[in-house]
Image: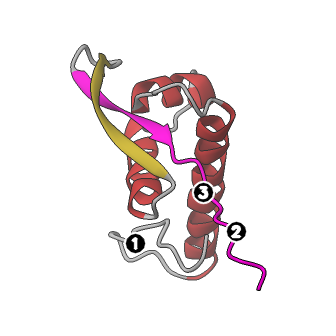
Amino acid sequence: MKNERTFYNTNQTTGPELIGARSDAKNQQDEILKVFRRNAKTPMSPSEIHNYLYSGTITPLTSVRRAISNLTEAGKLKKLDSTKIGIFGRREHCWEYVQAVYVQKGLF
């Protein structure tokens, strides 16, 4: 992901802690994209991704939402009109992986 913002430094973190936070956010975003890529035809909600990757951990759902928003902005995921009930009993939108389309240009 070229020059994409993955970590939003809202609490003015600096030094090694900032480097670690950026790395963690990037890794999380990459892992979430892998789940969508492996399930390219299956619409998924943030809660489903959270349950799949982070069930039983302290990873907040908001981190998953941040990564999904970043991936959507980068054109790698598409937000759908469909919704599912999330982990807090509220409807949340689903997303799907955007398949890369390669167009072969003329050879001559």
- Kindly identify the amino acid type of the residue bearing the numbered disc 1: Asn
The disc label shown at residue 104, or none: 2
Q: Is residue 88 left or right of residue 95?
A: left
Examine the rendered structure and indicate whether residue 49 appears above or below residue 64: above
Instruction: Please give the residue where the numbered disc 3 appears in the rendered image.
Output: 101
Q: Is residue 4 left or right of residue 84?
A: right
Viewer-nearest residue: 56 or 29:
29
Examine the rendered structure and indicate whether residue 106 appears above or below residue 29: below
Examine the rendered structure and indicate whether residue 7 appears above or below residue 2: above
Measured in 3D between alpha carbons, the distance from the residue under mark 2 to the one under mark 1, in whole angstroms, is 41 Å
Q: Is residue 15 left or right of residue 80?
A: right
How many circles with numbers are drawn on the protein? 3
Instruction: Please give the residue where the numbered disc 1 appears in the rendered image.
Output: 9
The residue at 41%/33% (across/down) is 46
Q: Which residues are magenta?
A: 91-108
| The C terminus - image quarter | bottom right
- Mark nearer the N terminus (2 vs 1): 1
SS of the residue under disc 3? loop
- Mark nearer the N terminus (1 vs 3): 1
SS of the residue under disc 2? loop
Measured in 3D between alpha carbons, the distance from the residue under mark 3 to the one under mark 2, in whole angstroms, is 10 Å
Q: Nearer the viewer, mark 2 or mark 1?
A: 2
* Residue 7 at x, y percent in the picture: 47, 66
**How many C-alpha atoms fall within 10 Å of the one at disc 1: few (<14), some, or many (≥20)?**
few
Measured in 3D between alpha carbons, the distance from the residue under mark 1 to the one under mark 3, in whole angstroms, is 34 Å
Viewer-nearest residue: 43 or 61:
43
Residue 85 appears in which quarter of the rendering? top left
- Kindly identify the amino acid type of the residue bearing the numbered disc 2: Gln
Residue 90 appears in which quarter of the rendering? top left
Residue positioned most to the right: 107
